[in-house]
Amino acid sequence: MKSIMRYFAAIGKPATSKGEIDIVGRRKLWYSISAAILSLGIVALAVFGLNLGIDFSGGVVINVETDISGQELGELVEGAGVDDAQIIEAGDGGWQIRFAEGPGVEEALSGEEGVTVQSLEQVGPSVSRDLTTNALWSLLAVSLAITIYVAFVFRRVEHPGRFGAMAIVALLHDALFVLSMFAVLGYFWGVEVDAFIVTAVLTVIGFSVHDTIVVFDRIRENLLRKSGDFTAVINGSINEVMGRSLNTSITTVLVLLALFLLGGSSTANFMLALLLGMLSGTYSSIFIASPLLVSWNNFQKRRAKS
Amino acid sequence: MTMRQKTRWQLVLLGLFALFVGVLAYPREDQILSLIGIEADMGVRRGLDLRGGVELIYEADVPQDRESEQVLDEVVSVIKQRVNPGGASEAVVRPAQNDRIVVQLPDEDDPQAVIDLIGQTARLEFFEVNPDATEPDGQLVPTDISGEDVQRAEAAFDQFNRPIVNLNFRSGESTQKFADLSTRIFNSGTQILAVLDDQPIFGPAPVQQPILSGESQLSGSQDIAEAQETATLLNAGALPVDIDIASRQTIGPSLGVTALQASIVAGIVGLLSLVVFLVAVYRLGGLVGVVMIGLYAATMIAVFKLSATPLFSDFTIVLTLAGIAGFIMSIAVAADANILVLERLREERRAGLSPAKAVEEGYRHAWSSIRDASIATLIITVILYLLARQFGELAIQGFALVLGLGVLTNVFSVSFITKTLLRGAARTRWGEKL
């Protein structure tokens, strides 16, 4: 833990005699880092797009285990009347067959000697359309509920709405980060976005808010207790909770990392999304959400003066 | 009562609680329970992706002039009757958003057979039952009347306000056949039995008088709900509307077992690293955290097992792969809560408070963060759960349910287990190390 603290001490300059790290003072640096990563992410999303799985696009995915060759599998599938199937090797005699539509394929495969159909997933176009709408509604509903809740929780400090708004900024920051990473992963490594990833993004939102609330909670306590410069109170609060924010993230990352590396292929992408979101969430709560409160405060003060 | 005495009682209570959840969570809990005379074989209900099975999502073609909810309910009871006639299996059939019906059949490996079964017309048969017959063949005599002969069945009340099912037979031959049958049964004093897809749905019961009009009443329903169900099933000679498959999924049993094993191994490795980290950073406090996390996990497993017993059959938690992910993540949340308390405790200790005082103050200050963050996570899980439920996304629903339940259990664990253990630890001779 100490080495991490030293690391942060090295990149920040002490702001006070107490040896605090000046996070807020360097806020423009943090904003720039986030802005750079997120704008690259938006470009990736716009250019590559997301590699949508059949949950979104509809179609059929069949996983088989077999000792026959991929070419023979292809002939079998073609024999069942599907000529645009993708046949991907999954290792250990496992193959994945993907196509848009073809009712006879499964029977043709399971009827063949030495081929075992392990799983089949078929998603019709109407179901896939719904998932997209559902995902967008969930994001909207969650964002709205959290803003209202955070504003309510912080009602005793000045401008509670700002706390709610900044929780949302952090939340969108993290959701956007995860999605843009998946655009990159999808483009270069063929990683797909499915219903699981939607769940992951919504969970990331939960983590993000969790982290942000831990920092804001300390800010609230100090704002109500101490008098003094707003900037100094915020920076002090961040310093006070940074250790535990890092520790809580480390424990979560340890668990997620184990699940990602050892938990099997069916949940690996889900865990990856959570990991990425977790890292982003810790960063955004310390380096984005709280410094933005200062920026907003200063902006208001300047406007009041002029 | 002094604080010391209070803490002692809480520790005793905690010990009893730990014993309770420990026994329930133990994989061979039936052996321990049988020692105190309870025969129970409990297990966690596993979802399709962990045990293999078939999931089908149908889309019903609801006509404009009928209420969607009612039509879906009819379709659901027809499908239920066909895939799970005795109600004994763990099959799930339920309506979802946009006129859909979700059908889940654990352990089933032939989707085509299920699709055929659901698509077929239900078979309604009438039998003549003669309880006095000596030969087995004579007791149950098949008749030539079938579901094809019934035009419509309706639940109603008779003049004595008893629930009944009104049967309308098709005019002509069907009415004649039923008239002949009822006359014969009435005269011979035998009984009538209606069987739907090999399941008795009415009778055996005597016939009060010969029925010549083609309108019959089946009495003997317990209440109007049962009469309604019987009527629905009788009308279910065919599905009330056309249904199409919107999506389907088959998971082989071996795939599920592999996934389960991988998750368990990963969970254990993740937990161990968590334990090492907590003890390395927080020492005695970390140890308290580890005990709390262990008890938390045991509590959750006990809840899963209890929810799978017949007593809580309406609230059974079905653990899917996503649910296990949610469970393991909720353990990370539990670790978070402990860290928040322990960090605050350290702060109070640095400010010069005694261990016992620092525990109270540290807990009191950490509580607001834990409460606010937990409520925020709960809000999200509730939204996720409700939306996933509406859209029939069972994996997401399972994830949200387990995570939400985990957050609630966690609030309890941190405010009872962590607090009591820390109070206890502060009063031992190692207390200074907190």
Image (cartoon, rainbow, N blue to C red):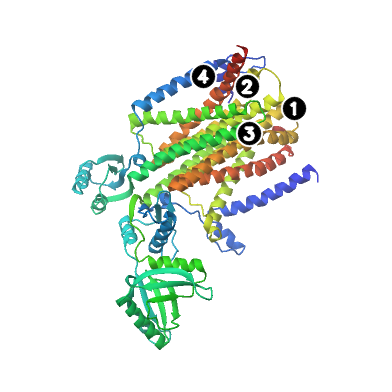
User: Which chain letter goes with mark 4?
Assistant: A
Q: Earlier in the sequence, mark 4 or mark 2?
A: 4
User: Which chain letter goes with mark 2?
Assistant: A
Binning the other alpha carbons within 10 Å of mark 1 as few (below 14), some (14 to 19) or many (20 upward) gives few
Q: Secondary structure at mark 3?
A: helix
Q: CA distance from mark 4 to mark 2?
A: 15 Å
Binning the other alpha carbons within 10 Å of mark 2 as few (below 14), some (14 to 19) or many (20 upward) gives many
Q: Which quadrant holds residue B364?
A: top right
In this view, the residue in front, B256 or A228, is A228
On screen, residue B164 versus residue A83, left or right, reads right
The residue that disc 3 covers is A153
Identify residue type, mark 4.
Answer: Trp
Residues at discs 3 and 4 in contact (Cβ within 8 Å): no
Identify residue type, mark 3.
Answer: Val
User: Which chain letter goes with mark 1?
Assistant: B
Identify residue type, mark 1.
Answer: Gly
Binning the other alpha carbons within 10 Å of mark 4 as few (below 14), some (14 to 19) or many (20 upward) gives some
Q: CA distance from mark 3 to mark 4?
A: 27 Å
The residue that disc 1 covers is B352
Q: CA distance from mark 3 to mark 1?
A: 30 Å
Q: Disc 2 or disc 1, which is closer to the eye?
A: 2
x then y, percent, for residue A47: 34, 26
The residue that disc 2 covers is A234
For the C terminus of chain A, the image quarter is: top right
